Image (cartoon, rainbow, N blue to C red):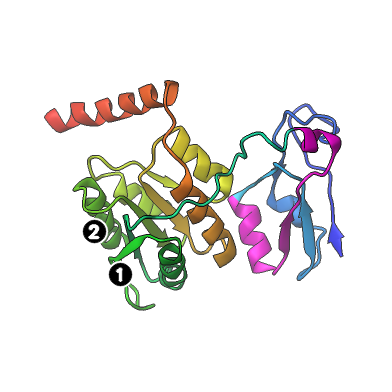
Amino acid sequence: MVRRVVFRTAGIIDPITARSVRRLLTESDLAGIGDGESFAVPAGALISPLARQAAFDRRIALVELSPVSAASVKTASRRSPFPAPARGDGKNVVLGADHGGFELKEILKEFVQELGYSVIDCGTDSGESVDYPDFAFAAARLVAQGKAWRAILVDGAGIGSCMAANKVPGVRAAMCYDETTAVNSREHNHSNVLTLGAGMIDAQLGRQIVKTWLATDDGGGRHERRVKKIMDIEKRYLKA
């Protein structure tokens, strides 16, 4: 049985009527859900990384709902927040992972190829313990050199590889845990490296994030101006 709960939002009692506020699912919201059950996530709600981990550990299926109402019908023709998957046209996408992300990397490698991209695999090639900075650097360097269009890195949490990749000049790595952060990292921040935490997400969510991230274009206008300021900071320190 799929259960629902009332989400806590700052200063808001009824999240149904307060549609402008993004609701946040936290680990505590899953406390009353039995292991192996399903949990209905209201459309548009954000799911914290700890909540995803708790759901994964307890085999709770997070079912993200799509609202069906007159309002949704009227706005159906508007642009979806998640772009349709684009064909890769043979663009090079490099993948890398440590031992914690090896299995998910192998799954995503096949998926990225199915989307029409050419894949460069920087390793690792097994579940034997290795150091994530080595593989993050190898993949990020190919993006910085223009030999790869984008990179996808997988480790246990996605954080360490993100930090390592961002030390490479020209790289804008973002750790994403759902489709919303994937879109934001592309439109707002022009990320060219995606990092994922294999311990935080399952394979299906990983595919959704990758598909969305690869299909989302850079945002122009104010986003382009702000990204330029990020790169200007990098250039200042390269000159030092």
- Within 10 Å of disc 2 (Cα), the crowding (few <14, some 14-19, many 20+) is some
Amino acid bearing label 1: Gly
Q: Is residue 186 visible?
A: yes
- Residue 51's place in the image compared with 187, above or below, is below
Task: Please report the residue visible at 38 percent of the width from the left and 54 percent of the height from the top.
Answer: 160
Question: Quick check: is 68 in the magenta stretch?
Answer: yes
Residue 166 shows which numbered tag? none
Q: To which residue does mark 1 refer?
A: 123
- Residue 160's place in the image compared with 1, above or below, is above
Question: Secondary structure beneath disc 2?
Answer: helix
Of the 4 image quadrants, the one containing the C terminus is: top left
Amino acid bearing label 2: Ala
**How far apart, in angstroms, are the residues tagged by discs 2 and 1?**
9 Å
Of the 4 image quadrants, the one containing the N terminus is: bottom right
Task: Please report the residue visible at 50 percent of the width from the left and 45 percent of the height from the top.
Answer: 182
Q: Position of residue 111 (x, y in %)?
A: 47, 66
Q: To which residue does mark 2 refer?
A: 138
- Residue 58's place in the image compared with 140, above or below, is below
Q: Is residue 200 visible?
A: no
In the picture provided, is 34 more to the left or to the right than 200? right
Marker count (numbered): 2
Query: Is there a contact, CB below 8 Å, between mark 2 and mark 1?
Result: yes
Residue nearest the observer in this picture, 116 or 205: 116
Task: Please report the residue visible at 25 percent of the width from the left and 40 percent of the height from the top.
Answer: 170
The quarter of the displayed image where residue 186 is located: top left
In the picture provided, is 89 more to the left or to the right than 170? right
